[in-house]
Amino acid sequence: MNEHLTTGVDGHELNHHYEACKLRAYPDPLSPLFKALQAARIDPYKLTEVPAQFAHLSGKPWTIGWGDTEGVSVGMVISQAEADARYVKRLARDFEPAVRAAVDVELNQRQFDAVVSTVYNTGRGGGGRDGILFLGGGGPSTFLRKLNLGDYAGAAAELPKWSRAGGQIVKGLQRRREATRLVFLGMDARSAIVSGEAKFP
């Protein structure tokens, strides 16, 4: 189902607003390495190599471009064109097919964009890791269960619950989930982003 849909303007707007594009690899912001670098007043976004005193700390997953973690390591640098190409490739290969495979009800363009954008951020789930579609044990998330029952409003209400990172509620994720919820319910992404910022100043 939803085979005819690919990520549209609202999905790209959400992803590009909330996933800043970095052309140099950086450690995950929740990683021990990132935190240690910040404490030492070393910019984690400008690393060419890991300082020797922090070599024992993990920075995984290393990230580059539009939030891409595949095949990324310290010191890696790419062009804007490479970042954009990696983004489009991953959407078409990983995220859009995951949504099409999991969702059993028809989605409109904005609903599809909102779900793909959320999967892009949280992952699909399964394999020991919770995501917006599946829980770590492989069962469907509450969001997916409600969506596949045709409870679109109930599914939308689940999105704000995915506002935690490292066990803590993160304001940036609250804004993102609110904007995504509004897009899912039919608002254009630009207006939804403004509304998300206003709700969580």
Image: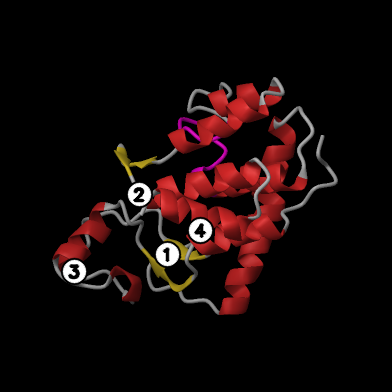
Residue beneath disc 2: 171
Question: Callout 2: helix, strand or loop?
Answer: helix
Which residue is drawn at the image coordinates 70% and 60% (left, top)? 9
Q: Position of residue 184 (x, y in %)?
A: 64, 42
How crowded is the residue under tag 1: few (<14 C-alpha within 10 Å), some, or many (20+)? some
Image: 92 above or below 101: below
Q: CA distance from mark 2 to mark 4?
A: 14 Å
Mark 4 or mark 1: name the one nearer the start of the chain.
1
Amino acid found under the numbered disc labelled 2: Lys
Image: 94 above or below 25: above
Q: Position of residue 40 (x, y in %)?
A: 14, 68
Residue beneath disc 3: 52
Amino acid found under the numbered disc labelled 4: Val
Mark 3 near mark 4, Cβ–Cβ under 8 Å?
no
Residue beneath disc 1: 73
Mark 3 or mark 2: name the one nearer the start of the chain.
3
Q: CA distance from mark 2 to mark 1?
A: 28 Å
